[in-house]
Image (cartoon, coloured by chain):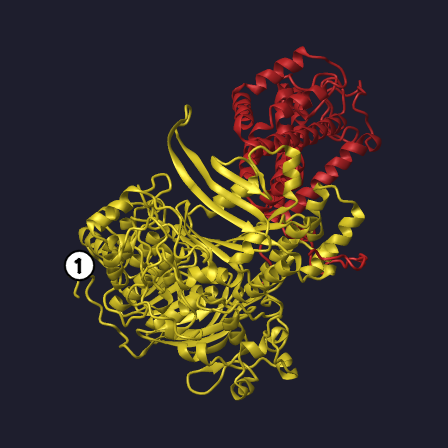
Amino acid sequence: MTDPNAPAQKTRRTAAGDVVLSVQDLQVTFPSEAGPVRAVRGLSFDLTAGETMAIVGESGSGKSVTSLAIMGLHPRTTRVSGSVKLHGEELIGRTDAQLSKIRGNKLAMIFQDPLSALTPVYTIGDQIVEAIQTHYDVPRKQAWERAVDLLDLVGIPNPQLRVKSFPHEFSGGMRQRAMIAQAIANDPDVIIADEPTTALDVTIQAQVLEVLKKAQHETGAAVIMITHDLGVVAGMADRITVMYAGRPVEQGRVDDIFYRPRMPYTIGLLGAVPRLDATNKEPLATLEGNPPSVVDLPPGCPFAPRCPLATAQCRTEEPPLDGAGRHLAACWETDRIIGEKLTSVELFPSPVFERTELAPSERRSRPTVLELKDMQRHYPLMKGAVLRRRVGTVFAVDGIDLDIVEGETLGLVGESGCGKSTTLLEILNLKAPTGGSVEVFGKPTAHLSRRERKQLRRDLQVVFQDPMASLDPRMPIFDIIAEPMGVHGFSKADIEQRVMELLRTVGLEEGHASRYPQHFSGGQRQRVGIARALALKPKVLVLDEPVSALDVSIQAGVINLLEDLQQKLGLSYLFVAHDLAVIRHIADRVAVMYLGKIVEIGDVTEVYERPSHPYTQALLSAIPIPDPETERSRTRILLQGDLPSPANPPSGCKFRTRCPLFAALTEEKRALCLETMPPLLDVRQAHLDHKVACHYPTVIDVLALDSSGTATDSPYAAAAAAAVAETAPDDAATPAAGADPRPDGDR
Amino acid sequence: MSETIDEVATAGPRPTAKRLTRGQLVLRRFLRNKGAVFGLVIIAVLVLVAIFGEYILPWRYDVKDRNAYYAPPDGIHWFGTTQSGGDVLALTVRGLGKSLIIGFAVAIIQTSLAAIIGSSAAYLGGWYEKAWLWVIDLMLVLPSFFLIAIMTTGGPKGPNAWMLLVVLLAAFGWQLSARVVRSLSLSVKEREYVAAARFMGLSTPRLLLRHIVPNIASMLIVDVCLGVGYAILGEAGLSYFGFGVQAPDTSLGTMIAEGAQSTTIAPWIFLTPASLLVLLVMCVNAVGDGLRDALDPGSMSGGRA
């Protein structure tokens, strides 16, 4: 595929298979108030042309610092030493002017947040043209044509028109694609992607990763992918470097790392990730403690304080990175791990506690704690500065029904813009919604007096997403936890006692009560938030993505704590998340939301194993699973386009603009989707807790879809032909072609 | 199924944190700024001089030395005398005291008003906010100089008339700060800990005082410091034209006014208070800048490498 407008076709300086980027003993040190921060302490790797290397680590591991050091983007006060050789030429020590000739030309970078990485006052086309014209003497017209071609390559519809748009007119996924287009504009030899999809929704993430793969394929570049998501790594990488506390602790091919890990940290990390295809609900492997701060590291291996195999040698001497072949590990106990075939189950045993499953019949016998009946929340769209007039409505939540009984966890999933946060706020505000009703413990919230509302607040508490922002930085944590009790008039002695008890319950030390939130790590702060929510002994906890801002190794501990508390205290949870793997692990029932409506609701095993709505199927299909073989052999159902605006939803079924089943239907069958919003009806027998809102529900086991099928839309082609309009519960909903019974086991 | 409380938790002694507290950290960063430290020292000296000056200096401010009219600086009168024989140094020190009191009082009242009005307007929104914004805009448009001038000359006279001046200066000075406080409060209002406090039933005034105002405290501290400088200059300007502090009371401004008439023949009458005014405002600004840099975690006063 020759592009006549491309800058003179680059003959690659390094042929495929040879080393294009060589990093040796990279060290990066920052000055700070508390002393020098050694963010990276000796990273070495060789990157071959055409391969993808993933650098995996949690916060504080030094992975983002590495990418900036390779590009030379650190401020002058930072000390970078070691060697970074591109095509055999040293990069460290070069001046900014010399490096500028290489950046954007041979080395390209894709940043995490596309909104802040693209200049807001220039059009997308201007920015791509700037990238081209900085390095090549190309006439403007030719550069513009190349920009249009690049946007077409990354899959932006109508590229001639959209090339003149500004970044704020694009959605998040499209902005990221535009940034990828800008990065590959000059056919770079190395592309560094720094957490490119962390800020994106799951279905958009799947699209962008496909684009990235395509871009790599087109340019033949080597890719360094920096991420903390092991699922993404399993699908994209050829080789992996796992970093911890600034050093690489394990390096090797992707299969070696996932199936034969040799370092306890990697083993623990792989065991702590909740998996979408896990059928059992065993507690996750928990790593005690927190990632160390790189300001003052103890001598010896930085993982030793958390490692179950730590010996005296581990605590005094830091192990070097070595091993047989190309699988290297930095651990003194590697032989023991290989010899005894130790896995996360043996190394990081999870706390054992009883998990009682909630059968559907049992549900009906328990009292309902929270019920939403056709709840609506509309916001008026106002225009005009002085005289504001209403020009439209944002249908944030457009009529949802759900209920939670005592002791149950309902997971509410959906992507950004679906209305799940608005639902939470409506419930917590305890005021009348725009339409429908909210009932808490059987009492409708519409006409509550102030005193009743305050009384009700004791039983309904909330845990927020961002542990840093949900605690007042000016108050010590004793005061933070004591505050709700102070508001409701507890005596000082009671407060004192209860705060200490709560600290113990959530696993924090009582002696830390006078410290401020910034002295704690993210996971500990989240525990403080949970303690504060439990202070008044509530019956219902509303959790707004409580673990999404935490590192993977800490996430597992908080999830286990939440499950434990539910069992011990008889709490009900409304758990809002976008991470379906976590929901599968913790929830009893799940509701999937799209554009303000619930499209599928039911028992979590039912919904995950027999998803009947195309959106649920696409969601499940888009989530990466940390298992390279599964990832390689999967076909993804990719949704086209972007979320429609909630101010202007499509007529009839709101999902029809992106629905792959709709696309495969005949004209007459489509009429039903165009006219009426499908009601939420039982999929099969009523006692199986599973309702779906689709005119032609079809069960497709997305987790078993593999690439042995033919075309990309084959799952829906057959389903469309066999579709029968659903107006009553249909016992004969047929599974479509390609949905094989699931093989046993998780892997 | 609730957990029973079995043991009585005794609160043990709370260990002090080994790390630096935020206050200590801010102090360390402040002390690194030589200009700010110098300014602080000078201000401290000036305050001490203003308080204890009249006991130390040889001449009192209201004594007229009939032997020395328009006397240049010499051994008896270190900074010379005025037209009526008053000692310039004593008068200046007295004026300094008055200017300092007015400056600090105005700054504190002004910032408190701005904090309360700005944060409540941001938090409550709706008509309350609209009304206050309208008032702020109106007062910014009004010619404050003239209004204060009219009210001080036409108003009560006497040794405590300066209090009216303080009230007027504060009343016309809080608006700009209030706007800044409002925008800062708007962003603090969106933080999750404010939502958490609301959802646990905390009343609005307590919420404002406990959660919102302390989190914009850095801006408020800097505002007080810089406000002192503006208030002193404002008062000096008014007094120069005869509108602020009225005779027989004196301030730096009135001294400068008096000295302006005789600049060519007796420049020391004008130069002494003017230089002191410039020195004072520069030092206050240096301290304000230093505090702002010390409180801002993102500024470049980074640590030792």
Crowd tier of the residue under label 1, counting other residues whose Cα lies within 10 Å: few below 14, some 14–19, many 20 or above: some
Query: From the image, which quarter does the C terminus of chain B lie in?
Result: bottom right
- Depth check: A306 or A183 in front? A306
Type of amino acid under label 1: Asn
Query: From the image, which quarter does the N terminus of chain B lie in?
Result: bottom right
The colour assigned to chain A within the rendered structure? yellow
Residue A445, x across and y down, in percent:
57, 37
Q: Is residue A183 above or below residue B170?
A: below
Q: Residue at 71% across / 57% down in the picture?
A: B3
Residue A541: tell me if it is visible: yes
Q: Residue at 68% across / 52% down in the picture?
A: A477
Residue A578: tell me if it is visible: no
The colour assigned to chain B within the rendered structure? red
Report which quarter residue A136 is drawn in.
bottom left
Which chain letter goes with mark 1? A
**Residue tagged 1:** A5
Q: Is residue A463 left or right of residue B276?
A: left
